[in-house]
Image (spheres, coloured by chain):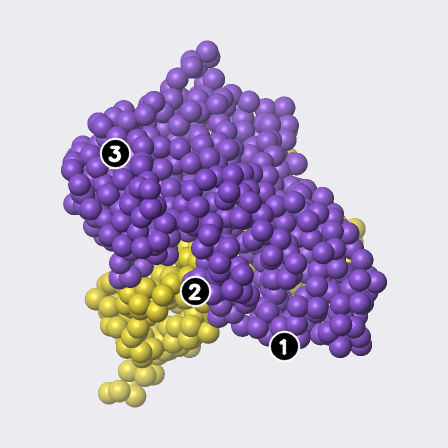
Amino acid sequence: MFRQLLRNSVLRRILAALGTLLGVAVFVFLMLRAIPGDQISSGLGTEAAALTPAQRAALEAYYGLDQPLFVQFFSWLGNIFTGNLGFSSRAQTSVLDLTAAALPVTFELAIFSIVIALLIGIPLGMLSASKPDSIRDGAGQIVGLAGLSIPAFLLGTALLAVLASSFGFNPNGQGFAHFFQDPVLNLQQMLLPSLVLGFGIAAPIMRTTRTAVLEIRANDFIRTARAKGVPPRRLQLRHVLGNALVPIVTMTGLQFGYLLGGAVVVEQIFSLPGIGRQVLLGIQQKEYALVQSTVLVIALAFVIVNLLTDLLYRVIDPRVRAV
Amino acid sequence: MSTARRASFGALTATGVALALVITSCSAPSKPAPSEGAAAGGDIVIGVTSDPDTLFPWKATQFQAVNVLQNIYGTLTEFDEDLNVVPGLAESWDVSEDGLTVTFHLRDGVTFADGSTFGSEDVKYSLDAIAAEATAAVARSSLASVAGVEATDEKTVTVTLKTPDAALPANLAVINMAMLSSDDTEEGLNTTPNGTGPFVMEDRTPSQSLTLAKNDDYWGDAALLDTVEFRVIPDESSIVSAMQSGNVQLAVFDDPLVAQTAEGANVTVATTPQLSYHALQLNATHGDLADVNVRLAIQCAIDRQEVLDTAALGEGEVTGPITSPAYKSDPDARPCPERDLDKAADYLDKAGKSDGVTIKAIVSQGEYATSVNEAQNLKAQLADAKITLELEVLESGAFVDRWIAADFDAAVALNGGRPDPDGMYGRYFTSTGNLNKVAGYSSPELDALFAEGRQTADPEKRKEIYAQVSENLEDNAAWIWLFTSYTYTAAASNVDGFVPMANGSLQYLRTTSIK
């Protein structure tokens, strides 16, 4: 029975995912405590030197730092199972509330960035592959290289500086608007950051597309289709691109996962109150519960995106379904 | 061929959509036009890089938190724009002949934001709680001389002292000494501030923004602005572009380069000298530094103007120990006002270290912009005098940890200053001071001088005493004082009446208006 269950690949993946999450939890917990300083010294700065032992003890008790490490770990983990992600003393609210507010921002940003990346990456990849080693291919490759090598902070800051000083356009200087509060302002605020992120991700997608298209085109079935008189446009879109989608989906899923945790720089530059900035602030202020729980949420999102990507293959590629 | 054309068309469409979005959003109004000619009223947005880490005034040390809380809470005394102590919630105070009793006469008609009346019970409650260790209030040591607090009647508070304390009025003026209502708890105030200041908290979205509204029941002249929003924009250059696009009207920068980019047609930048000072802290209890001649050799081997020029683009002033305008030290009154390598060599000879010494210095990375550059320049200058400065560059959290533990020979530090020299250095350089371990230096002479300064009420005499303190610190090269820097207050052209202060306070928001 158990072996049968284990053979079920979906279940196996879920178990592996739980193991990954536990690993992340332990790792983050230990890493945070390895960083010098604690919430007391990060809050008080050098003033912490003036604390008397009794004052310090009072603060340690307040932040729960007086407990042994394993008690801190298990009480945090235990709370998570009851849906309590902890409390942020800086924001004076629960980490769950903070995360519930921040996650949609990053999610929206990630989706827009991926859409932009796909809109740039796939056509550019196909364009490059259409005539390998031509000038056109070279131009595509250069755009790809630029996307990979221009750092987001540089592109973002430059865009902001130019648009703000020359056109007075800077929706990100206003307070953040959620989509349901003010969709127009929200979309404006998402525009520049998603362009910056999307441009960066377009590069790997473009390269994956190019390689995949070239590989598929070398296959016998393409030659057969062409010989049978399939019109070129149909051949490209359905036969070539259709088959090239599997690696593109993998790459997109992977990038989406990274985006959920890795948009820190862009969120910082464009003042988006997303999950990346939440982790950064948490680390700066040594808010242990905040960082631990948020990283765990990001890891969970990553795992879910990966699972969904796997499922998506099965839809796209019938061969995977059989496995 | 046709495929290629399709593909490029796709890319073009994507770019086109993006461009169209940019263009349409350009035309959207980004903020309502300010009403013209209005003297009072208006809303201001202040760009800040992070939001307050606490709203509880007794524990606030973070710059942003202090700035916000300063506008919400009241203190018994206050500073004016020149950092003189002026009446606050106490209208006046008398000191007895022997200096051991201070009687505060409280102002009439003061109410907290929740409508309750402020009275002597609240003062007693606040001072007692700040002095209690369990509160972990950061200003506790400022009340070390206090023996007892008594609410004599509704409007009078009598403070009895163990020793006379001339620094007490100045020490009471900081926000860590805010007067809280005796009905309030820390837990409650963490979310709902309840102060007696010119503004009350209206709204807060953690890590995004915090909005204050005018307090109509304020005891003094009511603030002119209707609201003040502290908007969190984590990146300083993003604050600059937010100012250029008119979304933010006021911001304070430390970095001269950023301030420079902010200056433009609609934004002016004011430069304000600061009380905080850059120093090479020496730990005189460690190794070679225990010898005053080694410390003096270091003192003589450094050209301070060069440190200032190379590390901070010359944006600042060479300083002695005391930086407050009323007690300012003369930066030339030191053993080597100019760099003097011969004298440095003499001092090393006297110390029996003619071959040179090696000193390890901790430097923080990321805490403030100039730290590493300062350290490198100091290292280069000291090398000419056979003094090897070994730099240990640490992440700011690690730096603070080492600094607190006094685990260093030398530290390149930016320390906060205070208007009163006793509050500023008494805790460092007296043998019982709570930061003496970190300062690494004390002497019976300094103990006596600081005690005398505390017991002397006459301002002129106090000036003389602190001039001696300053001289003593420099002659013994307790630390090497380098320079003070500026802060840069960038304000949109429609901001009127804001006065930047040397302690970085935003208290003059109460006189600010939007034209």
Q: Which chain is purple?
A: B
Q: What element carries label 1?
A: helix
Seen from the viewer's position, the closer of residues B137 and B148 is B148
Give the answer, above or below, for where A156 lies relative to A238: above
Where does the image place residue B73, in percent across and percent down from the top left? 32, 39
Seen from the viewer's position, the closer of residues A298 and B498 is B498
Q: Chain A is drawn in which colour?
A: yellow
Q: Is mark 2 on a helix, strand or loop?
A: loop
Same-chain check, marks 2 and 3: yes
For residue A202, the mark is: none
Distance from the alpha carbon under mark 1 to that under mark 2 = 22 Å
Q: How crowded is mark 1: few (under 14 residues within 10 Å), some or many (20 or more)?
A: few
Residue sitting at 46 percent across and 74 percent down?
A34
Where does the image place residue B149, in percent across and percent down from the top left? 23, 48
For residue B287, the mark is: 1
Give the answer, above or below, for where B249 lies relative to A96: above
Is there CB contact under 8 Å for labels 2 and 3?
Answer: no
Q: Name the residue under label 2.
A: B432
Distance from the alpha carbon under mark 2 to that under mark 3 = 33 Å
For badge 1, the amino acid type reads Gly
Q: Can residue B447 be seen in this view?
A: yes
Seen from the viewer's position, the closer of residues B498 and B210 is B498
Q: Name the residue under label 3.
A: B106
